[in-house]
Image (spheres, rainbow, N blue to C red):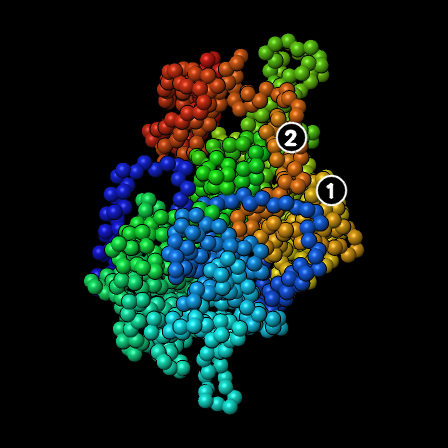
Amino acid sequence: MKLNKVLFGSLIVAACAVLIGINFSSTDKTVQYSPRVKQIDQTYFSNVYGIAGAIEYYNERRKNIKTGKIEIADMLKAEKAVYNFGKMSKQSSLNLNWIEMGPDNVGGRTRSLLIDNTNPNKMWAGSVGGGLFVTHNGGFTWSTVNDKMNNLSIGCICQSGNGDIYVGTGESFTTADGLGTLTTPGFVGRGMFKSTDNGLTFDSLDFTVPTNTNSSGAAWAFINRCAADPTDVTGQTIYAATNNGLLYTTDGGTSWTNAICLNCPSSMPIFNTGNFQDVKIGSNGVLVASNGGTTYIKKPGSSDFINISNNFNSAGRYEFAIAPSNPDYIYVVCGNGSGMRGVYQSTDGGDSWTLQVPAGPSELFRNQAEYDMALAVFPDDPEHILVGGVELYAWSGTDNTWDIVALTQPFAPGLYVHADKHAFAFHPNYNGTSIQTFYVGTDGGVYGSFDAGASYLELNTGYNVTQFYAMGVSREGWIAGGTQDNGNPFIDFSGNTKRSEVRNLPSGDGGYMQFSIINPEAFFWESQGGDAKRSPEKGDGAGSFFANVMCNGPCDEDYNEGPWVTPMVIWESFNDLASTDSVRFIADQAYNAGSTIFIESSNDNFPFEYITPVPLSVNDTMMIQDLVQNKFLVSTNSGTWMCKNVLDFSVDAAWYKLTTQPNQEGATCAAFSADGDIAYISTGNQFGSLLFRISGLLGINSNDNTTEDVASPQPPASVTTTQLFSSSQFITGIGVDPNNAENVVITLGNYGNTNHVYVSSTAASATGTGSFSSIQGDLPPMPCYDAIIEMGDSNTIIVATEYGVWATDNPWSGSPTWTNENLNFPRVPSFMIVQQTMPNSNCTGVSVSGNIYVATHGRGIWRCETYKAPPDTTSCSLPIGIAEGSSTGNFQMRLNVYPNPVTNGNAKIAYTLNEHADIQITVYDISGKQVQYMALNKQPSGTSTIDLDLRNLNAGTYLVSMTANGVRETKRLVVL
């Protein structure tokens, strides 16, 4: 067998050919898939690729703390409570009006595709968190079918010969083999839905609605596959591979029967009620199915199911495919947590099997075959198959080749298909010549090939099913956030639509995202496991900014020892009267007492007003309190850290260590008080979680040790840490009242518990753990993930939950009442909710004060403008034009040098001029000796970037100075 040779060689040749003529832009939105290696407690697993870290994240927040598993019965109980709550008409008392923000050009995990059997341009895609979507033009644009379906976790889709469409719900494949308690399901379903009007409407099939909330094996909680029997001319026979057996109907779904009897004939039949993962039916009626480590076949015309497992290597998951052109050709791919277990072929209808691709090391599945596995046979060739896992492979019996046929790293346009493949769909009339169309469902949405797999096209326009973990909002209302397997999409309303991602801040899986208001070009984001980056130019020039001691080793691109989603928050103020920092002012003219002057802060040179208390003469010097302040907090596995110079890209970030305890192996969330004096931090592990108050942040001053002063600083003297709350449940969110730091709301996860929302009215002053009390009231018993106290009314608390957004307007009463605020919001898991609490101002640029934003795990990001503040109508007296650099007269400039430190000898200089000028750039060593010089004449106004070659310099500290029109600005630069 010519393994890993023929097809791969042609693929690379094609990639190189395309690359010759391509000039890649830094704003290319394609995400490079980075294998995710997660360091987790060794009792679970070590160095596991891919979905494992996400599974742990879900499990911590959703499991029953008594059993250690996500129990189906608990999920069904909560789902029923939500359903019954809706029938009581307790809807939207706050009248929250939600607006979808996107991204509308980034897909998400898609486990099912169906092309209409009468119209090949019409296709449905089923996402695991965002519901069912439809396209009428072959995948080029999508729209949601119904955001209000009782369940938006789509597991499978099939169509009978009469045109009826069946949609199975629930996702049980969010597992990873060998992970103990982590082998738990994803989001529970609500049975089977059916459409008899070609997909216009879908109705729930009553028989399939899960009702047994006392059983961990409740029937119909997860429907993994469905298949219509093509030999039934009435179109009424459907099979469903469910978590409670292989079930079938012969009356279009009115009633269902277990298909596999284990001891029949018998007066007391025992049926196989295991978790069936697959079922396929050939054109002649041959049926194959798999149940964990067991596989079955039912021959045409027979009612008997034959166990054929001894033909294959043992595995945790088996996926079948039957050749459309010849049903005697049947294939099965086998895999588990250790990888590939083989591809088998039968050419005689399942009587005998041949191993065509052996078990062994393979990039196909890596370590997650039970999470992503797909198999299909080309309709024009019974000996040509596609196999999907992390990668996309093909096998051809004609020349016995097995190789990768698409790239998960975007070496070239046209060859990229997002990692993690789950489904294939071929054009009904595919013939390999005039019609060569097929589609692939992946963790990144839908991809199509229109040339038999020679090239691929991303087809996600309108398909907003992105799964966000966290998000940030800029002063203008731009959004970005961290997602599952889709990086950090950034939306600034300048794309093809206002909902389009304009670039992706690169990572495999994302986490927290923060924008600065003081410096709107400063972006901060992270990848899985706490790999954080900061950028001085809206995503460009990004680099790591943690000190090595924070990472238990080098904080480079391989750092991933933090929590899967590492809390990372920023606090900023333009009038911090408690600031302990100061700036030096040298009078360039005489000033009378009471004169108003503008002082440039050390934070991005942002100006603030100062009234002189005494007369000043030329060259008089004063130290003036710096009112413009920022604090940046991150909580890694090594502790909680805070930085006050994170906006200064010319120097290393200097970190204060706030806590000495190892945070119970990781923080879960964090929030600042409005005045910046308090940070509330929650930590957690498999045993539960704790809430801490870290006070005295305003007392930190320049005399306190940072990571620039000592290798491992101790907490500043002003800082105290107090434990406020403990729980066996996972603390998932913290909301602080913007008007009163005493008022704090926390949310808790975990099914199987009664209370999920707690508040304290003395959190800022409490000395122990007794100040928090439950405000569960009539809120259904579901995991809650985040909450805010509305900035204009301390009596309004809004919560992001497993089932969308909920609110109460009487949280401080003995028994609060809650309302469902999902009137025009999809009922999907919502992991973060934030409100822009900085007031609108023409000086600061904030224009969206009061807006509320929600990051959902399945339908992107949404915005509510119900509480939006009116725009600022006053004029700004600050000289904002000089806030970003030095100036003389009307001339202004700004200088940035990055990356800093420089590791490969190549740096970039970015400079901004408000008018054209001749510039001179000089590099000095630490002794003041000039080591490099360049002069650039007639430079245009605006921002320009040039390369700075430092390869001839020794490691050390240097000064980069730029002079123009008599103005000089200098930045410190470290060369490693």
Write the residue at 47% across / 13% down. 966
Quickly name the residue at label 1: 793
Lower sequence index among marks 1 and 2:
1
Q: Where is residue 223 in the image (x, y as percent from the top left)?
A: 49, 67
Please indicate whether residue 973 sits to the left or right of residue 23 in the image. right
Residue under label 2, please give it.
Answer: 871
Q: Relative to 620, does residue 368 appear above or below in the rendering?
A: below
Taking depth in this image into account, of 515 and 448 the one nearest to the observer is: 448
Q: Position of residue 847 (x, y in %)?
A: 61, 32
Q: In this image, 607 relative to 329: left or right?
A: right
Q: Judging from the image, what secondary structure is the residue with disc 2 in?
A: loop
Q: In which quarter of the image is the C terminus?
A: top left
Of 370 and 152, which appears nearest the observer?
Answer: 152
32 versus 177 height, above or below: above
Is 820 above or below relative to 949?
Answer: below
Q: Residue 134: x percent and y percent? A: 46, 54
